[in-house]
Each structure stands twice: as C-alpha cells, then as structure tokens.
Amino acid sequence: MLDRTQAPPIYQIDRLRLPQPLLHHLDNGIPVYDTRINTQDVLKIEFVFQAGRPQETKKLVARATAGLLKDGAGALDGAAIAEALDFYGSTLNIPSNMDSVNILFYCLTKHLPAVLPVLAEIILSPTFPQHELDTYILRNQQNLKIDLSKPDVLAYRNITEIIFGESHPYGYNSFPEHYAALKREDLLEHHQKWYHAGNCKMFICGKTDANTLELLNKYFGNMPVTAAPAPPFISAVPEAKQVKLHLPHQDAIQTAVYIGRRMFSRNHPDFSGMYVLNTILGGYFGSRLMANIREEKGYTYNIMSMLDNMQSDGIFYVGTEVGNEFTQRTIEEIYKEMTLLQKEPVEAEELDMVRNYLMGGFLTMIDGPFNVSEVVRTLITESLPLDFFEHWVSAVANVTPDELQALAQKYLDPADMCEVAVGG
Amino acid sequence: MINFSRFELANGLRVLVHEDDSTPMAAVNVLYDVGARDELPDKTGFAHLFEHLMFGGSLNVPDFDDPIQLAGGENNAFTNNDMTNFYDTLPAQNIETAFWLESDRMLSLNFSRKVLNVQRKVVVEEFKETCLNEPYGDMMHLLSDLIYKQHPYRWPTIGLETSHIEGATMKDVRQFFFKYYRPNNAILVVTGNVKTEDIRLLAEKWFGDIPRGEVPPRQLPAEPEQTEFRQFTKEANVPVDSIYLAFRMAARSDPDFYVADLLSDILCTGPSSRLFRHLLKERQLFSSIDCYVSSYLDPGFFLIEGKPAAGVSLETATAAIWEELEKLKRELIEATELQKIKNKAESNLIFSEMSALNKAINLAFFELLGDADLINKESEIYQKISAEDLQRVANQLFRLENCSQLNYVARPAVSPSDN
C-alpha cells in the first residue's frame, strides 16, 4: 500500500557549472562569446554597446537612438528593413536598458546569410530620418500618457527617482518634454560616438559554426574603432534621504506600495548573501511576504521584493498593490518582516528550502543555449569573471543563518527605507 | 518534431511523455478539462478561484509549494475559458516529488475553510488589480458581453463581478472538485530528461489508484449566428481613446482557424505587417495597433485593437482599419507576402519547441483538442494555406454584421495629476 504521507526522496543537484563559451575575435578586435549548444536549428546574436544612460549628453537620447536604428539605414527605409527582417522570420528586439544598448537578433540558422547584410546596415549605418523621429516622439508621448495613468508605474518611477536623484542616469524619469527636445543631431552624435568596434561585444548562441563566424567577420569585422571604449561609470548618489511619499490617484481602488533603498551591483562582496536574503523575504512564491500578506491575510494578489543590479549600482525594493483599506497594515507588515530578519536567525528548514529552490534556479540558468548565453553576457558586461557563476553557487550553498542576520541588520533597517504609496 | 508516447491508465487518466535529454530539467503538466465555460451564470469566476484552492493543501500534504521548492522546482497554473492547467518544472532527478504532489491533490483536497476564506480575498484583489484599477481593465467584460449572448464565453474567466467570488461556499468547492477533478477528466504530460518506462511506473504508482468519476457530458448553448453590427461606447477615466473590433470566427479545431491565424499575421505580426506599417507608421493614425485570434475550443473571435494617435477621431481610425480589411477581401495577397507569413509561422513553431515546459503545455492542449499528434502536423497545415484560402476566410470574417465594436472615450481629466 502506498504511503502518501511519505515524501519521495530529494536528490541534491551535484554539478552546477556554467558551460564555457568559445571566445573569438573579429578582425577589428570585437570579442565574440560563442555558446555553441545545438539543440535546434536556431541562432541568437546579441550586440552590446556601452551606449546607455551613463553615456548620454541629453535625457532619453540612448533609448531613442536604439529605438530608431531599424527605421532607416544605408539606402533602406524603415519599410524595406521591416520587410527584409520579417521575410526570413527573424526577430529584432532592443529592450530598454540602463547601462548599455543590447540588440537581440533571433533567426533560423539557415536564413543568417540572407538577413545579416540588413542587420549590418541597421547597426553600422542608421540614418535616423527626421519624419521617423517625429512619429517616434508622438507615439512615445502617447504611450507615456497611458503608463502614467497606472499607480504601480508611478510608484516605481518615484522610488527610483527618490533613491538616485532626478538627474542621475539610473534615477531620472521620462517626461513628454524630454521626448519633445530630442533632435536628429543628438541621435547621430550618440551613434557616432558610442556604436563602434572599440565599444562593442558580441554574444552568439545556438547552432553556430565556423561559417557563422566568417559571416560575422565579413559584415562586422570592418567596423572601425573610432574611439576608446566608454569609461567605467562611477555612480555618484546624493546623501541618502528617507522620503515617505503618499500620492492620491484618481478613482484608485487599490494602492501601489513600493518600499526600498539603494543597494549595490553584483560586484559587491555582499551580493550573494543578499541574493539569498531577498529570496527569503520576497523573492519567490514561498517567501515571507507572500506567506504573510497574500496567503495569510489576503490583502493582495501579489507581493515581491527585488534586487535590481545595474553595472555600477543597484536598488532593493518591495512592491505590491493592495486594496486601499489594507495600505497602512501592509506597510506595517512589510517593516515587521524586515525587523524579524534582523532580530532572529533564519531556521535551518526554511534556509534549506530556499537554497534548494535557488539551486533549481541556477540549473535553469544553464539550461539551453539562450539561458547560458544570457548568463555569459551578464557576467562579461558587468566586468565579472566567468567563474563568478561557480562562486555565486557555492556562496548560496554555504551562507549561514548568522551571516544572513548580519546582512539584514546592515541592509534591511526600516529606518533606511524610502516609501512610496500611490492610490486612494 | 516532438516525439512522444501516449498511454492510458485503467482509471482513464491519459499520459503523454516526450523525452528530451538536452535539458537537465523535467516538466510535469496536469490539465483538467474544465474552465469558465462550465460555470453557472450566477457563479462565474469559480473555475479560476478553484485553481487557487488547489495550492492550499491536499489530503496527505499540508502545503503544495514547500515540497516543490525543496526539490529545487517551481510551479504555477492558469485557467481560461476552456481548461485549468497546472505545471511544475524541477530538476529531472526529483520528478517523483511532482508525481506525489499532483496525485495527492487529484485524490482529494483538504477542503480547508481558512484557505477558502483567504483565497476569496486574494482573487478579489486580483480582480481589482487586473480589471478595476487598470485603464481598459474591464475590456474583456465589455467585449465578451457584446460578442456572446447565449454561450458561457459571455463572461470572462476572472468572473462577472466580485460578489460571485465572495459568495463561493465550501459546498460549491466540494461539488466542483468531485465533478471535474477526476483522472478521466485530466491529461498528464511529462517532458524533459526522463525515460518513458520510468514515467509509466511512476504514473501507475501515484495516479493508478485514484477512482474515476462521473463527469457530466458538456451541454453548452451554441451561440446563434450574429446578424447585426453591435457597438458599445464607454466614456471612462482612461488616458486615451481606444477601439476594439471583434469578428466571430471558427473554433480552434476548425481548419479555418489556421487561415485566420495567418490573416492576423498579415495584419499585425511584425514591423512589416499591414496595419502596423500602413496605419501606424505611414499614415500615423494610431499610436499602437494589434490583432489576436482566440484559441477557444468553441467558436471564438478575431480581435483588432488600436489606440488612435492624438487628434485622430474614432471614426477616422475605424474607417482606416476597414479599408485594410476590405483590401484583404478584394485582392489576393502576393506570393512574396504569402511566403513571408509562412516563413514567420515556421520560425515561430521552431522557437516554441525550445523549452520543455512549453512542449508539455502544448502537448496537453492538443490532446484536449482530440489529437496530440496535431502538434507535429501544424507546420504542414500552415504551409498548405493558399492566397485563395486567405481571401475566402477574410470575406467570411470581416463583415459589418459579424463585427462587435467596443470604444473607450477618454473623459477630460478633472485634475491633471503630475509625474
């Protein structure tokens, strides 16, 4: 007879090693990190230029330059570029990023020779047509208007601005007038200054081979080195201030609550410990905040805490949306959970669960070419050695309850937190 | 190509296994053939609330999440009109933990009053977060009500109103569980670094002794043919105007579903698609525009949604969409454009086969549809579609009397809020 009260045995994950990428260099010196895992006939190429907010001379120039690359390049107009990329079923994705411009390109390997010339034009010779910039501005102003009607967006914008200050690259928010002030010359200059071989890294993965490298060299190996790479960004932040901001929002029946503080980049010695501590507090479904505020009290559908790491800085925050009547009690409970982590060491049972959960997460990070390449890109662009991954795993495996308590005392003091609530 | 084995236990549980040794992980997916369409009109949102209760502990396991996390895994679920789907991903060597947990909650829940009380509140907060506190959040409520008059698709999965969720009783919960959460009403799919023979043994061990149930045959009212244009306009505190055009279309199992899917690619998928290129980029009539086809098991709808650019009236924006639709009805599409959307379809299918979890969810869905092997036939189905097929289906769909239109008109702001 099956005893259903007995859990099946759990086996530890015995080996967590990051598959090492091959490292090639194009003729002009661009490093190409190649994660060659052939599971499907697919390919992803990621270009990283150190051309983000720290390199801007004017607000939003980095985002607009990246956003308009595909709207005109060489002799091609936006329509011709779109047609060429779509015809071969390829996808070009340029996510918004603080520190760098990341150009993600996906296609079936067999189509690479046909689409690569177009991709090269987009990256090397964008024309930034004036009429495309005009519509880009109008469209983004309209979309911004929609975003600004959402309490959670407003709360996030405010907390990052409070933490870093409104003129800091990581802290400033977009406003309609920033879009309106963008000039075509700004974009040309930003591209000319930062999109060059000396400021570029490439990450490729999937079904790659010598032919892939030859093609990349043919189209990108001639890209000139026009200047030095962008100098490392030193994040200067004004004196910490503990702001508590409560903004009313028209018709809101829920309140978005964000509580957070400045933290650090992945290079900081406390990073791995905080990674575990954040998970315990609000980083997974079984976290203390979820257990208390959702599963015990039913105040919210979702509550989480995050460690956002930029290249040169970072933030920690707790975020949730709760019924207006629960706002005050939720804020109190969030602080209570922080204080509890400061006062009492985490029990072995809970720490074991979090550790195992994170080990499963590490295993997912190295599952398949796309995930591996993403880890490689994160480490390289954040100036971390490739064996950082193994050190990170072992730090998570070995962190003790005492060390976690000391970290909570250092970083999770309610008196150090900023607080934003937007709602009714 | 996704190779899989399929077998059935004596209690009617269908089991599908796909071996993939390129990943160290495994995915376990349990689909129950029950969704919002099976609810009573005065107890809507129940299937989704029930999904939440499935995490509140079962007969022999007080908590679902802790053991999965201890095994290095993650789990979640979703509910839609047609089904309720639960999934776990974990390191392959710990797959038995998922069998233990999934089988125990199929055997019986613990029917805890406290869990029901808390999850009612959680779902009400979810309702507020996604439908009431979000601009355009009641779109599915308004649209479903416009398109469907008889069929239960007329209410959205989250439920018609929060009072239906608040009114759910423990009696409702017990009845629903023993009516629908039975092995003969479920599909178990396992993918990843596993061996079929091991899975067969595990399935027998953990699910074999769960009794089958009497699942009532589904008798849903068919939605009568739409014969008149329907329109509803809501003035609301939304930041900008918005329009939605919904056209009734075929069910997921109908061959014309695939044709409609390609029509949506022609119109809105990718930067060279017609509505994006012509209406947003060239004529600058919209700040965003998109299309979807529903994957409903009963006849669904083709949706076009757009936000007119500042200063563009709803009438102008709507007329521009119709011009493009009329063109699709009138003119055969050119060979290169047809080739383009087929290349896109091929690419999408290959990229969708990269994750073990995706494959598990898709296999379960196609088995529910009646034939898991469809997963390997879709590519060919798309490749065989002709320009004439596209024109024929465009003429069927894009008729005014087959259209339901929802408009939001932005109310002028009373007090402009800053930041």
Image (cartoon, coloured by chain):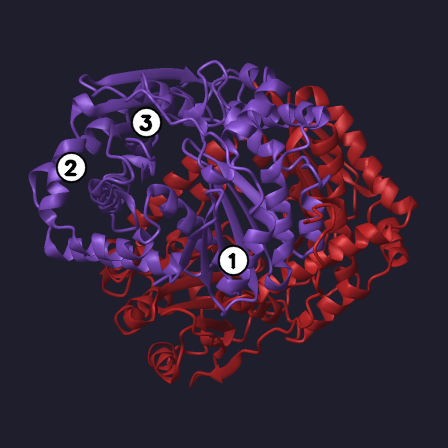
Q: Is residue A387 above or below residue B306?
A: below
Residue nearest the viewer, comparing B292 with B25? B25
Q: Are marks 1 and 3 on the same chain?
A: yes
Q: Amino acid at mark 1?
A: Arg
Letter of the chain that mark 2 sits on in the rendering = B
Q: Nearer the viewer, mark 1 or mark 3?
A: 1
Q: Amino acid at mark 3?
A: Ile
Q: Which residue is mark 1?
A: B200
Look at the numbered disc 1 and give the secondary structure of its residue: helix
Instruction: Kindly identify which numbered label has been placed on residue B126.
Output: none
Look at the numbered disc 3 and give the secondary structure of its residue: strand
Compared across the picture, whether B181 is left or right of A83 comes to right
Residue nearest the viewer, comparing A358 with B92? B92
Residue B282 location in percent, x, y? 23, 43
Image hue for chain B: purple
User: Which badge, 2 or 1, is on the more N-terminal residue?
Assistant: 1
Q: Nearer the viewer, mark 2 or mark 1?
A: 1
Q: Which residue is mark 2?
A: B394
Q: Amino acid at mark 2?
A: Ala
Do callouts 1 and 3 mark residues in contact (Cβ within 8 Å)?
no
Q: Is residue B248 above or below residue B292?
A: above
Q: Is residue B323 above or below residue B174?
A: below
Compared across the picture, whether A15 is left or right of A21 comes to right
Compared across the picture, whether B154 is left or right of B403 comes to right
Residue lying at the far front of the rendered structure: A1
User: Which badge, 2 or 3, is on the more N-terminal residue?
Assistant: 3
Q: Which residue is mark 3?
A: B243
Using the rendered view, name the quadrant where residue A72 is placed. bottom left
Q: Which chain is red?
A: A
Letter of the chain that mark 1 sits on in the rendering = B
Any part of residue A248 in sight = no
